[in-house]
Amino acid sequence: MTIRVYLLVSFLLFAVCTQAQTDLAVEFQIYPTGFLPGISIDHSLSGKSVLYGRVGANLFDHRDLGVQDEEEGAGLGFSLGYKNYFKEGRIGWRWGIKNDIWRNTVDWQTGTDTGETKIWVVQPTAELSYVFRKTHYFIAPSAALGFEWNVETDGEPTGEGAILLLGVQIGFEL
């Protein structure tokens, strides 16, 4: 068992330390009831394929679009995904899939009742973006479509459902 773990860790370290290109970026996404700021990393697997990761925050105000009359909250989370360029060179159009995991706290009100709900959110999305590069810097506007599920709820139910996100990544090559 120990040799397998050693080989796996060695392989992963080798993969990260090879000549593959890695981009670091700030990323912002907006959706009709919220805002997702974060820091992301794109690590090349090939000339067209990228492994994607992000850590960030989820700030939202569902207003009366959720289950309760008013829902407002925030949380922290991370994303893991895969992106693929339509052509070699890490420039131009690319598509991607990712999954976000958020731990949110929601303050809600319905009539005179108020409360707080803590939720674990799973949010798979599909994304289309266009990457503009200038030397070691890039900007990539994007549009994504997905669904958010409250997979664990501690408190009263709160809003979930289809989600449309518009965003931008602004970063540089490491």
Image: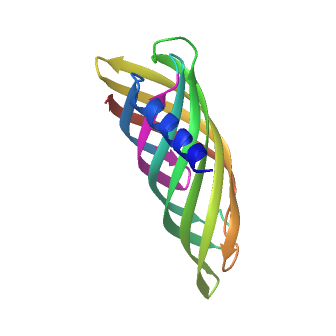
Which residue is drawn at the image coordinates 63% and 60% (left, top)?
A: 121
The kind of secondary structure the magenta stretch mainly shows is strand
Coordinates of residue 1 in the picture (x, y in percent): 63, 50
Instruction: Kindly identify the residue that appears in the image at 68 percent across and 73 percent down.
Output: 153
User: Residue 155: which quarter of the image?
Assistant: bottom right
Q: Position of residue 85 (x, y in %)?
A: 55, 19
Residue in the image at 59% along x and 74% along y:
118
Q: Is residue 88 above or below residue 129?
A: above
Of residues 167 and 40, the one drawn nearer to the viewer in this rendering: 40
Most distant residue in the bottom direction = 112
Q: Please report the bounds of the magenta region as a residue range.
A: 29-45
Q: Position of residue 23 (x, y in %)?
A: 38, 31
Q: Nearer the viewer, residue 166 or 96?
A: 96
- Image coords of residue 135 (percent x, y): 28, 17
Where is residue 63, by image quadrant? bottom right
Q: Compared to 157, does 17 lie above or below? A: above
Residue 67 seen:
no
* Horizontal relation, residue 105 to residue 39: left or right: right
Q: Tell me: 84 left or right of 42.
A: right
Q: Would residue 170 be visible to someone looking at this image?
A: yes
Residue in the image at 51% along x and 52% along y: 78
How many numbered circles are shown? 0
Magenta region includes residue 150? no
Q: Is residue 106 above or below residue 143?
A: below
